[in-house]
Image (spheres, rainbow, N blue to C red):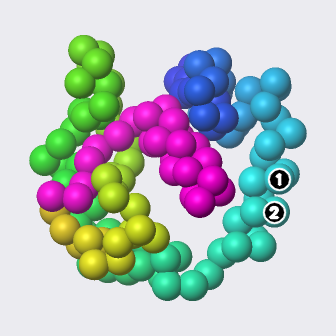
Amino acid sequence: MAKHYCGHAGCRTLIPLTQHYCDRHKHEENSRRYFHRKHSGGKYEAFYQSTAWTKLARQYKVAHVLCERCLSRGTIRKADICDHIIPIKTDWNKRLDWNNLQSLCQYCHNEKSEIEVAERKNK
């Protein structure tokens, strides 16, 4: 059966594809759903659902099929996500800039996102 990493940033537990979190982090599933319901909408969500972003992200992932962070660490892993190096919440003008994109696996994306959220809270 195919497996993937738990959705909790930093957790390396392999779980079935039908689950989002391991047993240890299962409690986060409900809080995460609440977070997305509470904070969904706005120009950021609309952008990520736009045709322009969908096409650009697909093209970038085709050109960069491996996780760029893992590669820099000497590991080869398939990329799952096309990510902005500088978040669009920081610089909206770089949202469609090819040079502001990177391909990341789910683990590296979660790790990066957790750091960004912590930095925004500290400001």
Q: Nearer the viewer, residue 98 or 121?
A: 121
Check disc 1: other Cα within 10 Å, few if <14, some if 14-19, many if 20+.
few
Residue 91, given in percent of the width and then of the height, sits at 35, 72
Location of mark 2 (residue)? 34
The residue located at (65%, 56%) in the rendering is 121
Q: Nearer the viewer, residue 10 or 61?
A: 10
Magenta stretch: helix, strand or loop mostly: helix
Observer able to see residue 16: yes
The residue located at (35%, 40%) in the rendering is 104
Q: Is label 1 in contact with label 2 (beta carbons under 8 Å)? A: yes
109 relative position to 118: left or right: left
Amino acid type indicated by mark 2: Tyr
47 relative position to 60: left or right: right
Location of mark 1 (residue)? 31
Q: Is residue 94 above or below residue 104?
A: below
Q: Please, what secondary structure does the residue beneath circle 2 have? A: helix
Q: Nearer the viewer, residue 17 or 51?
A: 51
The residue located at (30%, 31%) in the rendering is 69
Residue 27, given in percent of the width and then of the height, sits at 86, 39
How far apart marks 1 and 2 lie (CA) works out to 5 Å
Magenta span: 99-123
Looking at the rendering, which quadrant does residue 14 occupy?
A: top right
Q: Please, what secondary structure does the residue beneath circle 1 have? A: helix
Residue 31, given in percent of the width and then of the height, sits at 83, 53
Quarter holding the C terminus is: bottom right
Q: How many marks?
A: 2
Observer able to see residue 117: no
Q: Is residue 89 above or below residue 100?
A: below
The residue located at (78%, 46%) in the rendering is 29
